[in-house]
Image: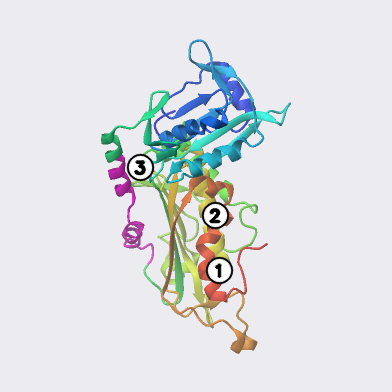
């Protein structure tokens, strides 16, 4: 495992196979534990989690060391209450509390026992103080152990925290300064952006492994284009099968109309572009967030669907790269002053229709955990899309079907 790569085994069988192979090693970002400590020693859990948060890491409970200090001895633990206990310690014995990912890997032959994984993403708010009993200290990993952090390292991490508390709106404005199409009075544009929080210069490379970039990108499109991700229809969508093009810092795919097509500027609703960059950042552009026909109708279904697929695609990219940290996501919908909902507007009952949208732009910027993007892409997308839709429809409709 390199400095950014965290191990997240998918099953107890995978854990046992790797442990039995003798190839598993404890490092600054991986620590195997025979069992959870005694209830009176919850501080040990807090120390290990807080220390791991500086650079990210994984704690695996249920694997012991042999006489040579290597993690080669399987020792499945009782799992009843184990996840809840770790979560309680993280939220009561560490300041600021951390978001950790806890997974149980149960034995096939005995579901009550297995292995407990605690995945600690790199924290943008590191360092985190342990506040258990009389201990009010910061910790770091030194080799295979967690030790008190020296003052100089505390100062360095506070400086790093300030650097990472970036103004995401500055990143958005920088990207918006590179328009995919000129503005058009009859159409609203959807812009989606995502940035992995901590520096990830080789995230795409880690995700693809030894495979071809095109293979990975096509797989990501396939995983995010199914009916299990978005069940409703609109176009263009993620199913075009067009080739990806190498650009300066990533890969770009025109899923709708392409730049050389003369009608692209005249009919921007057919434009759908997605770019995935080497560092795991990404951008999506759609020219059809709203269309002026007899009236200026918003396409809430299209915005909801594309946002969900964008989240799912990146969630799968981060999963393959084993990046479990935070992600800044931004949605911007431009030229929407005067649009009305295509879902609830009724020409025969105009007095009961919601009023037209009264602002030229909608914008939402939030930070999410990478694992939630693959586990619940729809839920993440709703966080970004529904505040706009609720105003547009006066809470009469959701483009996300039950």
- Front label number (3 vs 2): 3
Q: Is residue 92 visible?
A: yes
Rendered position, 161 above or below 47: below
Where residue 336 appears, as percent x and y from the top left, is: 45, 74
Q: How many marks?
A: 3
Quadrant where the C terminus is found in the figure: bottom right
Q: Residues within 10 Å of mark 3 (few under 14, many from 20)?
A: few
Is residue 165 a member of the stretch shown in magenta?
yes
In the picture, the disc for residue 309 is: 2
Say which element carries label 3. loop
**What stretch of residues is rendered in magenta?**
157-181
* Residue under numbered circle 1: 300
The dot on residue 382 is none
Q: What element does badge 1 sit on?
A: helix
Whether residue 217 appears in this view of the structure is no
Q: Position of residue 152 (x, y in %)?
A: 26, 35
Which sits earlier in the primary sequence, circle 1 or circle 3?
3
Q: What residue did someone put label 3 on? A: 199
Name which quarter of the figure residue 219 lies in.
top right
Q: CA distance from mark 1 to mark 2?
A: 14 Å
- The quadrant the N terminus occupies is top left
- Tell me the chief SS of the magenta region: helix
Q: Position of residue 239 (x, y in %)?
A: 57, 53
Q: Position of residue 253 (x, y in %)?
A: 45, 52
Q: CA separation, marks 3 and 2? A: 24 Å
* Residue at left offset 34%, top offset 58%: 175
Label 2: element kind: helix
Any magenta on residue 145? Answer: no
Structural crowding at the residue carrying mark 1, measured as other residues with C-alpha within 10 Å and reported as few (<14), some (14–19) or many (≥20) = many
């Amino acid at each position: 495992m390199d400095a950014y790569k965290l191990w997240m085994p998918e099953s107890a069988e995978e854990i046992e196979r790797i442990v039995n192979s003798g190839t598993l090693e404890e490092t600054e970002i991986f620590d195997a534990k025979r069992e959870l400590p005694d209830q009176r020693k919850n501080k040990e859990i807090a120390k290990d989690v807080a220390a791991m948060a500086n650079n990210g890491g994984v704690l695996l409970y249920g694997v012991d060391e042999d006489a040579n200090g290597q993690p080669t001895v399987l020792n499945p633990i009782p799992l009843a209450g184990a996840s809840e206990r770790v979560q309680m310690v993280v939220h009561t014995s560490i300041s600021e509390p951390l978001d950790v990912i806890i997974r149980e890997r149960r034995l096939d032959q005995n579901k009550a026992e297995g292995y407990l994984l605690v995945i600690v993403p790199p924290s943008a708010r590191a360092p985190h103080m342990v506040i258990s009993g009389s201990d009010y200290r910061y910790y770091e990993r030194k080799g295979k152990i967690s030790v008190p952090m020296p003052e100089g390292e505390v100062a360095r991490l506070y400086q790093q925290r300030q650097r990472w508390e970036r103004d995401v709106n500055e990143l958005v404005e920088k990207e918006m300064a590179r328009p995919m199409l000129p503005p058009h009075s009859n159409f609203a544009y959807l812009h989606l952006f995502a940035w992995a929080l901590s520096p990830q210069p080789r995230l795409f490379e880690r995700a693809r492994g030894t495979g071809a970039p095109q293979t990975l990108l096509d797989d990501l499109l396939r995983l995010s284009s199914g009916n299990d991700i978005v069940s409703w229809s609109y176009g263009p969508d993620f199913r075009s099968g067009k080739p990806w093009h190498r650009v300066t810092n990533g890969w770009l795919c025109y899923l709708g109309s392409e730049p050389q097509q003369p009608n692209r500027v005249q009919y921007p609703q057919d434009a759908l572009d997605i770019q995935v960059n080497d560092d795991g950042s990404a951008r999506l552009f759609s020219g059809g967030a709203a269309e002026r026909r007899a009236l200026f109708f918003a396409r809430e279904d299209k915005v909801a669907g594309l946002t969900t697929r964008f989240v799912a695609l990146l969630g799968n990219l981060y999963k393959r790269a084993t990046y479990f940290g935070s992600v800044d996501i931004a949605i911007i919908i431009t030229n929407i002053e005067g649009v009305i909902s295509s879902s609830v507007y009724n020409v025969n009952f105009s007095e009961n229709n919601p009023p037209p949208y009264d602002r030229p732009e909608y914008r939402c910027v939030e930070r999410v955990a990478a694992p939630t993007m693959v586990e619940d892409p729809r839920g993440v997308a709703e966080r970004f899309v529904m505040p706009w839709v609720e105003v547009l429809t006066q809470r009469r409709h959701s483009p996300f079907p039950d």
